[in-house]
Each structure stands twice: as structure tokens, then as C-alpha cells.
Image: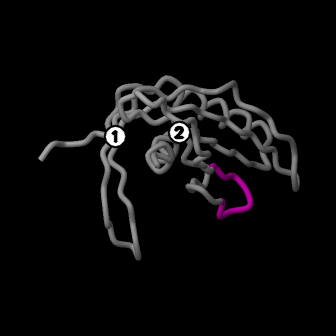
Amino acid sequence: MIQYHLMQKLQNVLPDLEWTVDYKTADDNTGTVYYEGGGSPGIYDVPIRHPRYMVYISSSDWDFAKYAAQIVHDTLHKIFNEPITVEFMKDENVVATKSYRVFLVKAASEPLPLGVANDKMDYSVNFDVTLVENKEEL
């Protein structure tokens, strides 16, 4: 839902990583923002949504991976009251847009080292988000 917006924020602070959304395209020095579903709203809530996102960092420079994971945490944790417009695409054409207000992005924990695979250190940084869709009256 808002993973592209989160990725853009992270590209600005960690330009040395190759950033993608929902899939990884490179073998080294990558950052990927994944949508992970989320919690269901209560029956009587206003249309508040609670999606979850994971930022996956992978680098053969283990110290840089640790640093990048901490920067991801520090950049996204406690974002609040931010408007976001999401574009929905089909065949490279925008078919719909939705406007949201992010009430809060909260880190679910400190960055988690996942270990080493193929000589690359991997980290996961997880976030819980509270947002509401802005519905304009016609």
C-alpha cells in the first residue's frame, strides 16, 4: 500500500543501496520494502488500517548492513501525521489513486540481524503503521 512511499524516504538517506518494493533485483547492497499484511480493524473503528511493513537489508559489507538497518529504523520510526497518495497501475498507466493520512509509523522492534547467507549479512526492520483513507465527499 504505502511501501513505495517508505522506499523513497529510505533512498534519500541510504543512496548506496539498490532499493526495490516487494521483490529484490540485485545480489548485493540491497534494501527492499515488503508489505506484510496487517491487523484487522475493529468493527466500530473509523476506516483505520493497520498494515505492517518489513525493510530487508542485505550487504556483503557487514558493518554497512548493520549501519543501514539502524538508519532505516531511525528514519521511519515515529513518522506521524503525514499525507500520502498511492497510485495503482495497470500496464504502466495509473488506473486509480487513493489518499491516506499516516497517523503513525512505529518500529516493531530494534533491527533484527537474520544472519549470513552467501557471504552477505541480512537484517530485517519491521514496522506497524496506523493510517486512514481520506475519502473526499462529492
Residue sitting nearer the eye, 34 or 67: 34
Q: Which percent across, then down, holds residue 42?
A: 48, 29
Residue sitting nearer the eye, 30 or 130: 130
Of callouts 2 and 1, the N-terminal one: 2
Residue range in magenta is: 24-31
Q: Relative to residue 3, is residue 28 drawn left or right?
A: right
Asked whether disc 2 touches disc 1, contact meaning CB atoms under 8 Å apart, the reply is: no
Numbered-mark total: 2
> Is residue 129 part of the magenta span, yes or no?
no
The residue at which mark 1 appears reads as 133
Q: Relative to residue 22, is residue 42 drawn left or right?
A: left
User: Measuring 63% from the left and 60% from the top, which residue is drawn there?
Assistant: 23
Q: Label 2 amino acid?
A: Pro
User: Measuring 80% from the left and 35% from the top, which residue is drawn there?
Assistant: 113
Q: In this view, does 25 lie above or below 104?
A: below
Q: Label 1 amino acid?
A: Glu
